[in-house]
Structure formats: C-alpha cells, structure tokens
Image: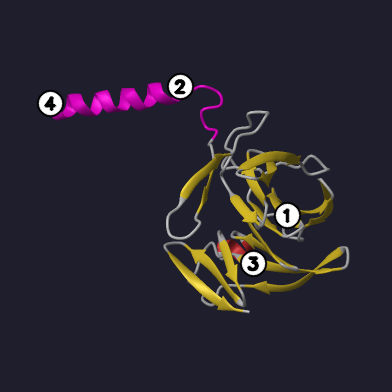
Amino acid sequence: MQKKYSIQIFVIFIFTFFVFLPKNSYANEPKVWFTPEENWEFRSKLTISDGSALLGRSISISGDYAIVGALDAAYIFRREGIDWIEEERLLPSDGAGCGWMLGCPVSISGDYAVVGASDSAYVFKREGERWIEQIKLTIDDKWADFGKSVLISGSYVFIGAPEDILFHGAIYIFKRNGTSWEEKDKLIPYSNDEMYFGQSIAISGNYLVYNLRRRGIAFHL
C-alpha cells in the first residue's frame, strides 16, 4: 500500500513542476572554463540580453569567439580579457527557425559560423565586428531533417540529415570556393542496418566522427 502512495506523490510532483515552470526556466547558462596548465578554472558565465530560451543547446568555440545556440537563434560572444561579451544575435534573413524544440545547432571556425535551421543551414562570415549571412545551404529532399547537426572546419561545412534515405541518414559536405559554397560529397551509412546517421558530427584533421543510435563511427576523409 505504501508503494502505491509513493508513486502517486511522484506523479503529482512532476506534473506540478512542468505546469508552474517559469517562462525562461528552460534557458541554460553556458559557462567558460580555462586551463593554464593542469587545472581548469571557471572564467565566465554566458548570458544574453533578450532572455531567449534554451541557450546552450549547442556551443562551439574558435579562438576569441564562441557561438551558442538557442531557440530559433544563435549568439556570438567575443572574449575581452577574462570576460565573454555578447556581440551579435544571428538570425536567418528569410526568418526560418530551427524547427526543433531543442534549439539551433551551431559551429564556428575562424571568421565563419554555421547555424542549422529547419531543412537548411546558414553560413555567416565575420566582417569587422559584424557577422553577415553569406549563404543558405539546402538540399532537394525536404524530409531529410537536413541541418539537424552542423560542423564547420576551415573551408568545409558538414551538415547532418539523419532522416535522409528513409531514416538511414546522410552527411553532406560543402566546400568554400571564394564567396560561394559548393556541395562536394555525401556520406552515407556503410550498412543498411544503420539508422539516423549524422545526428552528431565531430572532426579533427582528416578524421570525422559521427554517431549512430547507441554507437559512434569514424570516417577517414
């Protein structure tokens, strides 16, 4: 009898938590840590001026710049000494949103940043203190979940489409050529048993790592 009573109390508590949750309670507070030698030291908490929800769903750092994904937007931060200052809010020029409740995937490399949106991805380029939208990347398949994950490294952009090819998934590779970005390759699962290929991507040198459901796989580029 006591077990039944405990379960009822637990359910009521969870229901109450979500019903009365404040509007901005889903907003995260990304933090910056620094390691001079062996120990990591806390340096800064990243906050934004407009209180956008889900800040920190996706984050990336390159040199003195960091990009943080939030709900339907991304934010650029610039390091000034030990502080990180909000520099700009990145929004697609056509008003497209992420389309996911978890917020926008983001990545940054040097003077370029990429933000995933619903069935697309946007490349921004830093010009002085401004970040200017350079191009919108798309594919023909509108049911592929293209843009669910993004990664930029040097002159290459990698974009995951985990529902492409009947949910087997794919990763699209774009290469920068001057001011344009050209689709160069499409990576697909090595086995028909694999599902949701490209939900998450990471790269170092000539090696790319992606995740599948319950495990990760490495590619040599």
Of circles 2 and 1, which is in front? 1
Could you tell me if residue 136 is visible in this image? yes
List the residue tagged with mark 2.
Answer: 19
Give the amino acid type for the residue marked by disc 1 in the picture. Answer: Ala
Q: Name the colouring of the figure.
A: secondary structure
Residue 170 lies left or right of residue 190; in this view the side is: right
Q: CA distance from mark 3 to mark 2?
A: 38 Å
Please name the predominant secondary structure of the magenta segment in the image.
helix
Is 183 or 46 nearer to us in this picture?
46
| Amino acid type at image mark 3 | Ile
Q: Please say if 183 is above or below 24.
A: below
The Cα atoms of the two marked residues, 2 and 1, are separated by: 36 Å
Which image quarter is the C terminus in? bottom right
Task: Give residue 42's position: percent from left, percent from top.
Answer: 49, 44
Mark 2 belongs to which amino acid? Answer: Val
Q: Earlier in the sequence, mark 2 or mark 1?
A: 2
Sequence-wise, the earlier of marks 3 and 4 is 4
